[in-house]
Image (spheres, helix red, strand yellow):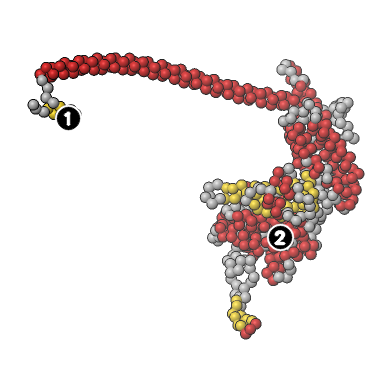
Amino acid sequence: MWAQRNHRDNVDVPAMTPDQMEALILRQAAEIGQLRAAVERLQAEKDVLRAERDEARRERDEARRERDEARAERDALRLELAELRRQHADLKQQVSGLLVAIQNGDERMRRLLRREYGAVSERACADQGYIQEVLSAFENLEPDLASSGEQIAALTPATETEKPLSSDAATPADKPAGRTRQRPANAGGRNPLPADIERRHSTYVPPANHPFLRHALGVTPAGTTTIERWSVGKMDLHIEVLTCPVVRLQLKGGITTQQTLTPPSVIERGQVSDDLLVQSAVDKVVDHLPAHRQEQRAARLGALIPRAKLCRWHIALADFLGDVAAAIFDEITACPVVGIDDTVHRLQVDDRRVCQQARLWAVTAPVGSYYLFSPTREGKWITDLLDGFHGAVMGDAYAGHGRLLATPAVVPLFCWAHVRRKFHESEDKARRPIMLDLIGKLYGIEAGLRAATPAERVFARSAQAKPILAEIKATLDAWAIEPRILPKSGIAMAVSYARKLWPGLERYPTIGQAPIDNNQTERAIRPIALHRKNSLFSASEAGATGYATLLTVTQTALLHRLDPVAYLNDIIDDLHYERRSPAELTPTQYARRRGVAGKQAP
C-alpha cells in the first residue's frame, strides 16, 4: 500500500485501484460537463441581461434627452413670456406717459412760453390772453399752405389799437400789481468811482506813434484833463524780515530766562504771517479759490508754497478760531427759531481712489450761520448738535430730522418754498395756478411785514394768513379725493407732500420770529456747492472740519456786511492779546461795536 498526497487540498488519501480511478475520472468528467453547461447557460443569461441593460440605458438616455428638450423649451417659453411682459409694461408706461403728455400739452406750451418770454421769477406770464391766443391758433392750424399767412398772423400779438378785448382776457385792473422800476437819477451816464479808494496820481506822456496822432500834421498843446479808472498792480507777495529784541525775564522764585519777543502769530514759529494766512483762507472759503490754484498763483510770483502746506495753514487758523465759531453757535441757538439743512461734501478715503459722500450741515438764524461736518448723513449728527435747544426748527421732509423734530422741546416748522416748488413743477394747467395764487397771497402778506415786530407779525398773520391757510387746506383735501387726479401725477405728489407736512406748515403764523420758508438756510449752503465745484473734495476729516469752522466765521461776517479779511485780522489781534473774549468777537458783536448795518433779527 502506498499513500498519495492530494496536492489540491493538502490531505493524504488512500491509494485507489484502476477501476476506482476510472470511475473517478468518469464522474469528474461528468461534473466538468455539467459545469461547462452551467457556465454556458450563465453566459447566455449574462448576454441577455447585458442586452436588456443596454436597452434600458438607451431608453433612459432617450427619456433624459426628451426631458432636457422639454425643459429647454419651457425655459425658452418662460423667457419669451417674461420679455412679452416687460414689453407690455413698457408699452403700458409709454401709453400712460403719452396720456399724461396729451392731457398737459397746452400747459407745457405755457411753460415754454413763460421760460422764453416771461420774467425771471416763477410767476406766470402776465399776458394770459396772448398765451390763450397762441394755444387757440395752434389748435386751429391746418395743413393748407394757402392759409398759412393767416395762421401766422393769428400767432402775432395785436397792437394796443388792434387787439380786441375778449370776455376772458384779463383787464389791467385784474393784473397783479408788480413792483415798478424807478429810473435812476444818473441814468445814461457812468456811476462815479468810490471816493474812499486810494488815488495814485500820474501824468501820461503820449508817445509819437499814438493812434490819435497817426494822421496829424501838427500838434499844439491846449491844456490837460483828468480821468479816473480802476487799476491794479502786482500782488505784493514778499518775505518780511523782522529784527526782534531778545530780553531776559525775571520770573517768580528768582528764575531768570531769556526770551525773543516775536509778534504773536496763529502758527507759532511758523513761516507765514497772520495777514497772508487770513487772505489765503478767505480766498479759499469766500472766493472758492482752491489750494492748488493758490499754489499756481504763488509760483507765478516766484514763491514755492505747496498746497499741502496751505491746507495745514488753513486747519491751524480754523483751530485758532474754534472758540469764536462756538460763540457764533451759542448766539444762533439763543434765537427762538433756527433753520437746518445739509449738502454733500466729498471726503477722500484712505486708498485715494474714491470719495466718501460726507455731509456739511448748516444751522442758521438771523444772527449767523453755523456749519458742522459729518462723515455720514445720519440724523444723529444734527440731533446731537441741537441737543438742549428749546425753540422752533424749520427744515425739509428729510427723514433724518425726525428724531430731532420729535423732541418735546422742539417745535417743528416746514418750508412753504418747498411746497410752492412742488406745485410749480407740476403740469396740471387747471389746478396749479389756483394753488400758486393762494401761496402767493401768503408771500404777499410777508412782504408787508418785513419791518414789523414779532407781536405785530403774529397779529397780522392771524388776521390775514390764517383764512388763506384754511382755504389751502380745504383745497388740498378736495384734490386728495378727486378721482380724476392720477396718483403718480405731479399735482397728486405735490398735494400729498403738502398734506403730510401740514401741521408744520400752518404753525408759522403763531410764531412771530418764524419766517415763512427756509430760504435763508438754502442760501447758506450755496457757497458749499460753489466750493465743491472747484475743490472737489477734502483730503482728511481735519481739513473738512476746518473748512466748516472757517465757513462759519466768514459767512456770518458776510451776513453782517463785514469785510472778512479786515474782520479776521482785527479779531485775531484781539485774541492774541486777550483784549476780548471769543463771545465779544463774533460778527454780531463786532458789527455792533463798529456800527455796521448788518442783517437784523425779525
The quarter holding residue 194 reads bottom right
Residue 96 in percent (x, y) is at 69, 25
Residue 91 in percent (x, y) is at 64, 23
Give the number of the disc on residue 344: none
Q: Earlier in the sequence, mark 1 or mark 2?
A: 1
Residue closest to the eye, 364 or 486: 486
Residue occupying the point 80% across, 44% down: 504
SS class, disc 2:
helix
Using a 10 Å C-alpha cutoff, classify the residue at mark 2 as few (fewer than 14 neighbours), some (14 to 19) or many (20 or more): some
- Disc 1, disc 2: CB below 8 Å? no
Mark 2: amino acid: Ala
Residue 153 in percent (x, y) is at 78, 24
Q: Looking at the picture, does residue 569 appear above or below residue 262?
A: above
Disc count in the image? 2
Residue closest to the far front:
1
Residue 183 in percent (x, y) is at 83, 46
Mark 2 sits on what residue?
A: 326
Q: Looking at the picture, does residue 592 appear above or below residue 496?
A: below
SS class, disc 1:
strand
Residue occupying the point 57% across, 50% down: 348
Mark 1: amino acid: Val
Residue closest to the far bottom:
254
Mark 1 sits on what residue?
A: 11
Kindly report the distance in space between the C-alpha atoms of the residues bearing marks 1 and 2: 114 Å
